[in-house]
Amino acid sequence: MNTMTSPPPYPVDAMYTLVRDAAWEVINHTQAPPALVGSSMLASMAVASQANVDVLLPTGLIRPTCLYMLVLGDSSIGKTTVDARVGAPLRAHDQKRAEDCRQALARYEADMRIWRTADRSLDAKLQDALNSHANPQQYHGELMSVALSEPRKPVPQYLLHQSITESALFEALDGDGKSIAIMSDEGELVLRGGAMDKMGILNKAWDGESTMPRARKDLHLRPTNPRITVSIMVQEEVFDQFWKKRGDVADGSGHLARYLVAWPTSNVGFRRMMTEDHVWAHLPAFHQRISELLDEADTRQANSRPRILLEFSAEAKELWLNVHNKLEPQLRPGGEFFSIRKSAAKMLEITGRVAAIFHHFNHLEGKISQETLQRALDVIQWHLCEFRRVFGERHEVPLLEQDKQRVGEFLHRRYWCQGRATAPWNEVRKYNPVRDQARFERAVWELQNEGAIRIEYHARGKRLLHLNPAAFAHDHIV
């Protein structure tokens, strides 16, 4: 059978202390998978940073610090809980913007009453002039002045969006340097939204294009130098439907290759209920830093100040060069990452973005150091291998092989790694990632045929799966 690898632990400890401690706190209190928490924190940091800093890569390209994230998983992994905990400052910022907009609308209504009164008064003067056969041109200057002084209705400037159409996207980005996020723990809203019908637009935004291509109906809008982070948390079944309809476009356009992917296994069935109150000693500091950067971005936007451009140190550039020279041969036919070469080719650029985010978020000074780049590499290498595990399979491995691998990974992680050499059939059936019963049973029978497991039958239909040490005693099932 094909090698069935279990992904290594998510590199939470690669984060700097401020983020690492907060991440472990969320993991311990919510009992959510580390990959889910880490991905959520990366997305929040990107949203907070993208309006403040760009990064000059060692290649000479200037790139934004926005990220595109994709987390796959069933409804039990804790997507909503983690998103609510980690992303709380983003929603609080939008609530503040909503209140600011409400006050601005009140001022606008007051200004409009004054303006309408002035406009009506001028209309009366003009009518009197016409009635008395006087020259109406004497009021031309006043008419121009009143017309130009008409108050503009404030438009809500929200940071977070979910189901957003193409036109709404351009409205949100209208102006110079606007920053938004398309984020949802119910990824169906994003995948079926209008933005995903125009993946080329999102590609341009990810690349940091100074101007955005617009449809004829949106030509009056002028989004320049926009910044967009995308974070999609979605159930596997929903993503499969999207993949069947739009997968060729997502893959062929290079849109999918821009995402950091995670497919964590649910902890359901292995969580322990805690009676003591949770003490949040570290997450508030993470939240405070998010809020500080969002406020900094608003001030920067209001004062038309340019973003900070971060550069790499000489030592970091040398590390970059070494990694590039090791990675490039792996993109050739027969290489380790040939099947996902589009994503692997963007690995170093995404690493540069994450390094810049780490640098700025953690109050580091000067140029981006070799240490910071290495931390970012540790995180992105995990995501690259996860991309290969998820999408390399979709491209190359038949469905039965995928199901065997996923059931095998589940047994390895949830039973063998916990010191258990047997697994109850019904428990595995209930919690394993292959939800379709017929597919699950075919995968189990095939695993037994290949000697990885043995099914033992008991009274009343009870069945146990015995795990073969020869297959499960390593980091992979051979």
Image: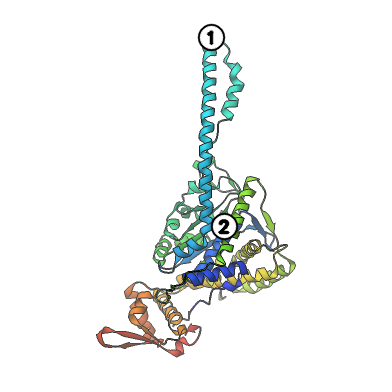
Residue found at the far right of this picture:
314
Residue 215 is situated, as x and y percent measured from the top left of the image, at: 51, 45
From the viewer's perspective, is 164 left or right of 225? left
From the viewer's perspective, is 449 left or right of 21? left
Identify the amino acid type marked 2: Val
Identify the amino acid type marked 1: Ser
Q: Mark 1 points at which residue?
A: 132
* Disc on res. 84: none
Whether 412 is drawn above or below 124: the answer is below
Instruction: Identify the residue at image location x=63%, y=45%.
Output: 302
Residue density around tag 1, few if under 14, some if 14–19, many if 20 or more, within 10 Å: few
Residue 119 is situated, as x and y percent measured from the top left of the image, at: 53, 24
Residue 258 visible at all:
no
From the viewer's perspective, is 179 left or right of 79? right
Instruction: Identify the residue at image location x=65%, y=46%.
Output: 304
Residue 53 is situated, as x and y percent measured from the top left of the image, at: 65, 56
From the viewer's perspective, is 408 left or right of 129? left
Q: Name the residue under label 2.
A: 47
The local secondary structure at tag 2 comes to: helix
Whether 310 is drawn above or below 279: the answer is above
Q: CA gap, disc 2 to disc 1?
A: 63 Å
| Image quarter of residue 283 | bottom right
Residue 459 is situated, as x and y percent measured from the top left of the image, at: 26, 87
